[in-house]
Amino acid sequence: MALAERLRISPGVPLLLAAFVWLASPLLLGAILSAAVCHELGHWLVLRRVGGRIQRLHITVFGAEMQVDDRRISYGGELLTAAAGPVSNLLLAAAMGLLGRWWEPLYLFAGAQLVLGAFNLLPALPLDGGRILWLALAPYTAQRVLSAVSLAVSLALLLGGGWFIWRQGGSPFLLVGAVGLTGWNLREIKLAKGG
């Protein structure tokens, strides 16, 4: 399969990157992009170790989505693969935080790692925390329970983020993730109801 068929980048990604450079700093963009790359590398390394492989990678303004050939992956392997991205971010956040006293910009990189790792552990699909919760629940009840939890978490992020920006000011970039989660969950609920 050709690289163009395996890797897809949404047209909104360059626009979001340009807006980020314009509204924030290139250093912050570098910190966030490096956290995202480390996150996906964490998934990929464990996925390879447990015998899976990536069929397609779709990069959107809301993050990266891997389509995985998981026919040979055990239940435990799936769980480890889902946890690997956030765990790699949290471990790197700790290491960079310790090294920040020698080179101050590492504090920014540590913060980006921490935020991305913690955000992805939220128990909402399509985040890693949602996948971990789905794997932890019995398959028969997982989808119903997780749909409700995912929608509640995404709406709380959307409302809380909007309220925080309204009251405190600041960057609206967290709302991009909240809007994406809410839209994804509403679409999934509609599909589950047959609409």
Image (cartoon, rainbow, N blue to C red):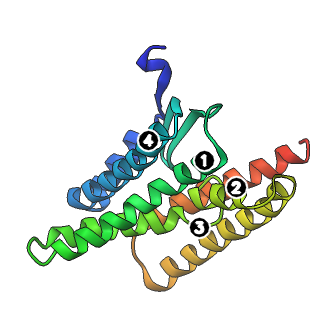
Q: CA distance from mark 2 to mark 1?
A: 8 Å
Q: CA distance from mark 3 to mark 1?
A: 17 Å
Picture residue at 66% right of the left edge, 47% below the top: 75
- The residue that label 4 is drawn on is 44
Q: Mark 3 or mark 2: which is in front?
A: 2
Q: CA distance from mark 4 to mark 1?
A: 12 Å
Classify residue 116 as left or right of residue 183.
left
Amino acid type at mark 4: Trp
- The residue that label 3 is drawn on is 122
Q: CA distance from mark 2 to mark 4?
A: 19 Å
- The residue that label 1 is drawn on is 78
Q: Between disc 2 and disc 4, whose residue precedes?
A: 4
* SS under mark 1: helix
- The answer to whether residue 153 is above or below residue 27 is below
Which label belongs to residue 46?
Answer: none
Amino acid type at mark 3: Leu
Which label belongs to residue 135?
Answer: 2
Classify residue 160 as left or right of residue 47.
right
Q: Mark 3 or mark 1: which is in front?
A: 1
Q: Position of residue 9 (x, y in %)?
A: 45, 33
* SS under mark 4: helix
- Badge 2 density bin: few <14, some 14–19, many ≥20, Cα 10 Å: some
- Badge 1 density bin: few <14, some 14–19, many ≥20, Cα 10 Å: some
* SS under mark 3: loop
Q: Position of residue 189 (x, y in %)?
A: 82, 52
Q: Between disc 2 and disc 1, whose residue precedes?
A: 1
